Structures are given as structure tokens and as C-alpha cells.
Image (cartoon, rainbow, N blue to C red):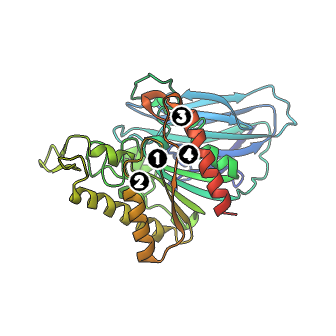
Amino acid sequence: MNTYIPGTEKDIRILGRVGGKEEPAFFWTGSGIEFTVDGSELSIEFITDYEIYEQWIRVEIDGFSMIRTALPKGRSTLTIYRNMNPDNVRKIRVVKEVQPMMADKSGLLIVSEIHSDGKLRKLQPKKYKLEFIGDSITSGEGLAGAYGVWEWNSAVFSTKGHYVLTTADNLGADYRIISQSGWGVCSSWDNDPRRTLPRYYEQVCGLLSGRGQLEAGAGEKYGFDAWQPDAVMVNLGTNDASAFQNNAWVDENTGESFKQKLNADGSFEEKSLERFETAVYNFLVLIRKNNPKAHIVWLYGMIGRVMEPCILETLERYKMDYNDENAAYLQLPDLKTEWMGANNHPGVPSHGAAADVITEYLREILK
């Protein structure tokens, strides 16, 4: 039996942002490993921890989803297959199904070892690198539950049928996801200005602060130079729109409050709108600073289009100010009732429709 260690084997592709450890920890949705191997038997050893939200993973063999399961705490071994034709070569992808959970300071997933009686095959390079930044849609919330299911737990998150993985597969691309349910570019859905993706963009996974998480590299500065994307896709704005409809956030310790406000006639308050537009503008500047050659695309529209005019106007102002023509806006298909999954979030049909639009767009832009 051969043993292979992810992070040290050149023929095991690491998916997603990881810290600089020999045994990489996987924090983000869709992060994991990918490799090609022959042989009759394969098992994978994991090290996991959690207090609230268990770690779910999914295993694909030749693009087909074979296993989806929650992992027990501690060290465990999962048999992927046995008694297979030893001469057949199989492409294996193991992905984390769940976003990093800020409330669970114990949450951790490490793919420790791969055991097989076969040999790894040479890893083939991907055609493109794509980075996706988003909220619950990009975290895959609702993809693992039926319409009408309302649950806040790890089980309703999934990457099966996910628009990012589908787009990447369509284009033969490597991908990385950074996403958090309920978060936005200016504030969260409930007006918390601390819960925004730009705040943590330059760290591996800075929203996690548990001891084990920090030891695994979550708080490290992210190495942009080592993985420069061909395109950065930002799917944010949905929760910023919700903030206008919800109560003010109040800091329990200081009494400080924050609220995105509407005028009496239902229009956006000027100051609140300026805050949102400034956040969009500054995030575009931050993305460009760290990805000088990437094509930046602001995606929007899978759950409403309230903020679309603001995003478009801000994007055009940024492009003019920085003479940056390598940035664009792409409207995605809005959610239909029959496309919904759990928690009234986009299900597989919605993700598939979005992937079709993004694939067509990127295929033209990146050729």
C-alpha cells in the first residue's frame, strides 16, 4: 500500500486557499484535493474537529459524486473504493462542502494521508485559474436541501451542482472560493459592518480565530503571487440590499450602531447609498492591487437586482478613475420558485443557469 501526503506531492492539486503547512487545512467552500490514480483500492485519512458545525465532505470519481458525508471528530479513515479494476485510471476530487463557520472556533478539516495500492499519475495543468468571492449563494447554502426546508446547519450546504465548480469544469479551470452566508461588501444582511468579505480578502481565512485554526494558518497573509487568477468574480450585493430592510446593528459592548437606511418614499438614503458605493469601489481597488492582470467581473442577480444600478455606476466610475478596461459587470438569471433549494436559496437549476451565463462569458473573454 502506498501513502501520499497532500501538500508534499506534486501530483496532488490543492484546491482553495490554504496556509503554509505541510498538512494543509481546508477552510473554504469547495476547497480540497484533486488527483489521478490507478489501483484497486483507495482510502483517505482525515483530521477534523468541530463543536457546533460538523465538517461535511464530498468525493467525486471521474466527475460523479460517489460519497457525501459528515466526518467524525479526530482522525478517521474513509474508504473511497475497493475491489476495482486495478488497471483503470480514475480522477478523484475531494471537496469541503461547508463554508468556514465563524461561530465555531474548533472547526477544522485536514486531509492527512491518501492510501492506495495504485500510483499517482502526472497532474495535468488546468487551462485557467478562477477566483470567486461571494455570500451564501457562493457558499452553496440550500444546495443540499429541498424547497421548503428551513435549517441552519452544515448539512444544507453543498458543492454538488454548484455554479463555481460547474463553471470551472466547463472551462477546464482551477478555482478558489471565498464566501460567507449573510455577508456583503458594505455590511451583512443585519447591518453588521464587520461582516464583509473585503475585510478578510488579504488573509488565508482571517474570519476564523480559534487556536487550532490559527495554528493551521487561517490568519496568515494570503500569498497572491503564488496563484494569480485569470479572472476574479465577485458575487456580492444581495445581503447589502437586505440591510436596508432590516433593523440597525448594535454592538453589545460599546453601544455603537450601524444602519443602512431608506427614505420615507422607499428610496435609498444618500449617505447610506454612498457607503455602499464606496465599499464597492474600494473593493475593486483592493482586488486590482492584488491581481494586476486578472479580468474582474462583478456578478449579481441570482436573488434580486436591487443594487444593480449602484454597482454599475460605481464600476464605471472605478474604470474611468483607474483607466481599467479589464473589469465588467455580468447579470445572472434571477431566482424562480421552481429553482429554489433549502432556506429559499438557489438550488441546482439556479446554479446551473448561472454557470451557463458565466461559462459563455468567460469562454469569450479568456480565449
- Quick check: marks 1 and 2 in contact, CB under 8 Å? yes
Q: Amino acid at mark 3?
A: Ser
C-alpha distance separating marks 3 and 1: 20 Å
Tell me the SS state at disc 2. helix
Q: Nearer the viewer, residue 266 or 207?
A: 266
How many numbered marks appear? 4
Of mark 3 and mark 1, the one earlier in the sequence is 3
Tell me the SS state at disc 1. loop
Query: In the drawing, does residue 317 fall left or right of residue 76?
Result: left
Q: Which residue is mark 4?
A: 31
The x, y position of residue 247, in whole percent, is 20, 40
Q: Residues within 10 Å of mark 4 (few under 14, many from 20)?
A: many
Q: Residues within 10 Å of mark 2 (few under 14, many from 20)?
A: some
Q: Which residue is mark 1?
A: 301
C-alpha distance separating marks 4 and 3: 12 Å
The single residue placed furthest to the right in the displayed view is 87
Query: In the drawing, does residue 296 fall left or right of residue 275?
Result: right
Label 2 or label 3, whichever lies nearer to me, is 2
Q: Amino acid at mark 2?
A: Glu
- The residue sitting at 42% across, 38% down in the picture is 107
C-alpha distance separating marks 2 and 3: 27 Å
Q: Which residue is mark 3?
A: 158
The x, y position of residue 56, in whole percent, is 52, 32
Q: Which residue is mark 2?
A: 308
Of mark 1 and mark 2, the one earlier in the sequence is 1
Q: Amino acid at mark 4?
A: Ser
Of mark 1 and mark 4, the one earlier in the sequence is 4
